[in-house]
Image (spheres, helix red, strand yellow):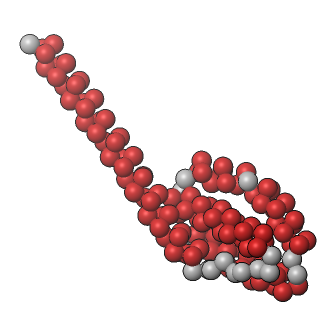
């Protein structure tokens, strides 16, 4: 009888702890999804400008996606994703230098204004605003 109660107790404890872990994962997934929605609102509010060279416009759109992903990871406090995206920062710096070399003076002004807006969005996301 004591063995049956012990086994039943162990089974219940295991079952309840398993359910709690699943609930935590679901909560974390919901938080990540909510952060991604907020990040979309922030980044989409800073419309990607149209540059004189379609290749530069494509670069800006890709950079916009990178920033959106970084903001979502920051808001979700997803350290693994932040680290993964941060590792790509040097690659983006190189791409940025290549794109800047191809830009006209007007394009450079557009890019500077746009980049400043995105940097502000990222700063706001990191500080929880």
Tell which residue pokes out farthest to the front in this image.
54
Please count the marks in the image: 0
| The N terminus - image quarter | top left
Q: Nearer the viewer, residue 62 or 27?
A: 62
The image position of residue 2, as x and y in percent, is 12, 14
Q: Which of 53 and 14 is in front in this view?
A: 53
Query: Can you tell which quarter of the image residue 107 is in?
Result: bottom right
Q: Is residue 89 left or right of residue 106?
A: left
Q: Residue at x 77, y 60 (%)?
A: 92
Q: Is residue 89 left or right of residue 75?
A: right
The image position of residue 27, as x and y in percent, is 37, 53
| The C terminus - image quarter | bottom right
Can residue 112 be seen from the camera position used here? no
Tell which residue pokes out farthest to the right in this image.
101
Q: Residue at x 20, y 29 (%)?
A: 12
Query: Can you tell which quarter of the image residue 66 is in?
Result: bottom right
Q: Which residue is drawn at 73% across and 51% down?
A: 87
Q: Which residue is drawn at 77% across and 83% down?
A: 110
Tell which residue pokes out farthest to the left in this image.
1
Q: Is residue 56 left or right of residue 97?
A: left
The image position of residue 72, as x and y in percent, is 55, 62
The image position of residue 91, as x and y in percent, is 79, 55
Can residue 22 be seen from the camera position used here? yes
Above or below, comparing residue 123 to residue 18 in the picture: below
Q: Nearer the viewer, residue 102 or 117?
A: 102
């Amino acid at each position: 009888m004591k063995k049956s109660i012990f086994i039943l107790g162990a089974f219940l404890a295991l079952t309840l702890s398993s359910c709690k872990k699943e609930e935590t994962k679901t909560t974390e997934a919901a938080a990540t999804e909510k952060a991604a929605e907020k990040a979309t609102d922030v980044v989409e509010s800073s419309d990607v400008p149209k540059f004189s060279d379609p290749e530069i416009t494509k670069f800006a759109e890709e950079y916009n996606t990178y920033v959106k992903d970084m903001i979502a990871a920051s808001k979700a406090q997803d350290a693994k994703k932040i680290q993964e995206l941060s590792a790509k920062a040097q690659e983006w710096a190189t791409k940025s230098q290549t794109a800047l070399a191809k830009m006209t003076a007007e394009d450079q002004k557009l890019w500077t204004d746009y980049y400043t807006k995105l940097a502000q969005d990222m700063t706001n996301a990191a500080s929880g605003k």
